[in-house]
């Protein structure tokens, strides 16, 4: 079955610094990959998704992710962190649009002033 | 994308009782998924529910504890049975929305068992 591993349960950056959240996937067939954000006491919000089109995917709030098959990675980046980016981020994988989704353990992003 | 109405949004329940969570989708979908998010943790898939057949449960989840109904293509329920404090979690339903952003999630049910 497909799975994802998020490296780093906590990431702390300064405001204005680069944000890099790491995600590696495991799948025997071409995957669909997703990043979700969850703010405290709120539901999940889709940031971006990869579904076998362009390998560099741009999402909302200035985030983007690059699918690298050779590295089985789908890392999330943002050039300049904002205080409002502080949240929990989840990487997720599925293998078809109508199949279940598996989530990583999550990475809590803290942004320091 | 599909819109999901999930009820109740939260509840506080006594141990030993049961709670049924409902999800209504505004369009017909083949598969619905139920997840649990324990405090401070990620989402774990409980089961996949197809209309007209028994739900498929993930390892560690059993039908007696989490019975699921799927009477039609727009509705599903998850019951948390004989609850204990360890069942305190957020429960979410989800459907696949291929053309609109992957998957749509309900707003979640925050369950506290006392």
Image (spheres, coloured by chain):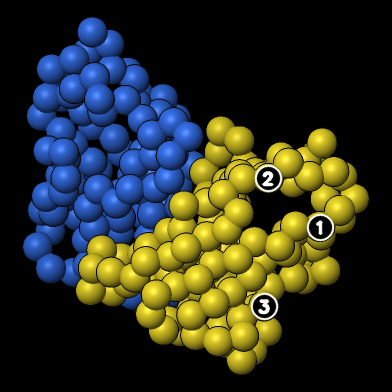
Chain colours: A blue, B yellow
Say if B23 sits above or below A57 in the image.
Answer: below
Of B87 and A78, the residue lying toward us: B87
Q: Position of residue A84 (x, y in %)?
A: 25, 25
Q: Residues within 10 Å of mark 2 (few under 14, many from 20)?
A: few
Left or right of B40? Residue A35 is: left
User: If the image is split into quadrants, where does the C terminus of chain B sit?
Assistant: top right
Sequence-wise, the earlier of marks 1 and 3 is: 1
Left or right of A78? Residue B12 is: right
Q: Residue at x 24, y 19 (%)?
A: A83
Give the labeled residue for mark 3: B69
Q: In the rendering, which numbered label is found on residue B18?
A: 1
Q: Chain of mark 3?
A: B
Give the labeled residue for mark 2: B11
Q: Residue at x 13, y 53 (%)?
A: A57
Q: Residues within 10 Å of mark 3 (few under 14, many from 20)?
A: some
Q: Chain of mark 1?
A: B
Tell me whether the residue at label 3 lies in contact with that at label 2, contact meaning CB atoms closer than 8 angstroms: no
Sequence-wise, the earlier of marks 1 and 2 is: 2
| Res B21 quadrant in image | bottom right
Q: CA distance from mark 3 to mark 2?
A: 20 Å
Q: How many marks?
A: 3
Asked whether residue A68 appears in the rendered view, the answer is no
Q: Secondary structure at mark 2?
A: strand
**Mark 3 against mark 2, which lies toward the viewer?**
2
Left or right of A27? Residue B72 is: right
């Amino acid at each position: 079955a497909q799975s994802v591993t998020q490296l780093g349960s906590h990431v702390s950056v300064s405001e204005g610094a680069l944000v890099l959240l790491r995600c590696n996937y495991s799948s025997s067939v071409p995957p669909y990959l997703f990043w979700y954000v969850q703010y405290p006491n709120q539901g999940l919000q889709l940031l971006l998704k990869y579904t076998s089109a362009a390998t560099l995917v741009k999402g909302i709030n200035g985030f983007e992710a690059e699918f690298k098959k050779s590295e089985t990675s789908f890392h999330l980046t943002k050039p300049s962190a904002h205080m409002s980016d502080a949240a929990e981020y989840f990487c997720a994988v599925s293998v078809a649009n109508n199949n279940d989704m598996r989530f990583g353990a999550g990475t809590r992003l803290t942004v320091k002033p | 994308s599909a819109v999901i109405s999930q009820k109740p949004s939260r509840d506080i329940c006594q141990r030993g009782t049961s709670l049924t969570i409902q999800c209504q989708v505004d369009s017909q979908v083949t598969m619905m998924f139920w997840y649990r998010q324990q405090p401070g943790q990620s989402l774990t898939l409980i089961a996949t529910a197809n209309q007209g057949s028994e739900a498929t449960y993930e390892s560690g989840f059993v039908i007696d504890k989490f019975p699921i109904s799927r009477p039609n293509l727009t509705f599903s329920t998850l019951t948390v049975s004989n609850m204990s404090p360890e069942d305190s979690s957020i429960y979410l339903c989800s459907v696949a929305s291929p053309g609109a952003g992957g998957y749509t999630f309900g707003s979640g049910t925050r369950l506290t068992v006392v």
